Amino acid sequence: MSVIGLGTWPLSGGMGSMDDQTAIAITRTAIDSGINLVDTAQVYHGSEERLGKALKNGYRDRCFLATKVIGDYSPEAIRSAMDSSLRKLDVDSVDLYQIHHPDPSYPFDQTMETLDRLQEQGKTRYIGVSNFWVEHMQEALKTNCIHTNQLRYNMLDRRVEAEVLPFCERSGIGVLAHSPLAKGLLTGRYGVDHKFPDDDERSHLPRFRGETFAHYVNVADQLQQVAADKGISLIQMSTAWLLRLTSVSCVLVGAKRPEQIREHLGAAGVTFSNDELTRIEMILQDTPGELYGVRWDGDSDG
C-alpha cells in the first residue's frame, strides 16, 4: 500500500462543485502516479458513482479500494449499504470496508460479526474502522480483528497522539490519516480576507471565520517559512510531518485538480532534523485544536 493515498471527499463536491471528468482525471492521475489506495464512503455524495466510472479500463485492478458505512449499523443496514456501494462503484468487492464513526447504540459485537460475514462472502478483503477512540477499538476487538483505523490527524488536530496512535501501533492496526491539511488551513494558500463560496463546506465552519481563521492563517504563514527553508511546500511538509511516525501507515490526501496530486507526492521520503521538528513544535504550541464543534468532522481534505 502506498504511503500516500487518495481521499475522495472533494470528489463529492463537499469542498466546491466538481464535474465528473475532473473527478475521473484526479483519480486516474493519482493511480498513474503510484498512489494505489483510494478511499471513499457511503456518505460522500456521489463519490462512489464517480469512482465507478474512473476505475474502468483496468484502473480497478491497480488500486486498493476502500469505502465506509455510516449511520444505521444494524446487520441488515450494513449488508444493504455494502451492496449499494458495490453497485455504485461497479465492482464485485472492495479491499477494505470501514465503520465510519463509532456508535455504541449498536452493539459492537453485532457490527463486527456482520463485517466478518461480508469478509467470508468475499465482498471485502479487510475490515477497518474510522474515527474510533481506544475504548471503541477495545470493544470491537473483543469480536473481530481490525486492520485499520482512519483518523483525523494533522498539525492542528493532535488529540490522537496521546493514546490512539500508540494503541494502534501496539495492536497492529494500520493508521490511515485523513484531513492532513486541516481542510486547507495547512496549504498556505489563504489570506485572512478569503471568502469561501456557499457550496464549500468551509464557509460554515468556525475555523474559517473571523479571528479564529486569522490565527490559523498566521500559523500557516510561519509554517510555510519552515517549509521554504527545507525547499518544499507547506503541503508537502504537512504530509511528511505525519509520515515521520511509524504508527502512520498512509496519509489520505485530497485534490480538486489533477496537478495537486503531483505536489502531494513530493512529501514521500522527506525527513526532518530535530531542530526542524522543534521549530515546528514552537509554532504549534499555542495553537488551539479540534474547533469543528464536534469530536470528529469531515474527512479527507483538498
Image (cartoon, helix red, strand yellow):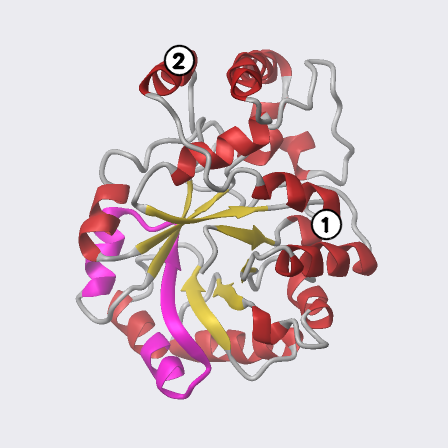
Q: Is residue 117 magenta?
A: yes
> In the rendered structure, which disc, 2 or 1, sits on the residue that comes first in sequence?
1
Q: Please state which of residues 257 and 75 is positioned toward the viewer in this rendering.
A: 257
Question: x, y (%) of residue 249?
Answer: 38, 51
Q: Which residue is mark 2?
A: 279
In the image, residue 73 above or below residue 221: below
Q: Residue at x 73, y 43 (%)?
A: 259
> What residue did someone put label 1 on?
13
Residue type marked 1: Gly
74 sits left or right of 209 in the view? left
Q: Is residue 186 visible?
A: no
> Of helix, strand and loop, which one carries label 1?
loop
Residue kind at label 2, given as amino acid type: Arg
Q: Residue at x 57, y 52 (%)?
A: 7
Rendered location of residue 28, percent (x, y): 70, 61
The image quadrant that residue 301 belongs to is: top right
Q: Which residues are magenta?
A: 115-141
As displayed, is residue 161 above or below residue 46?
above
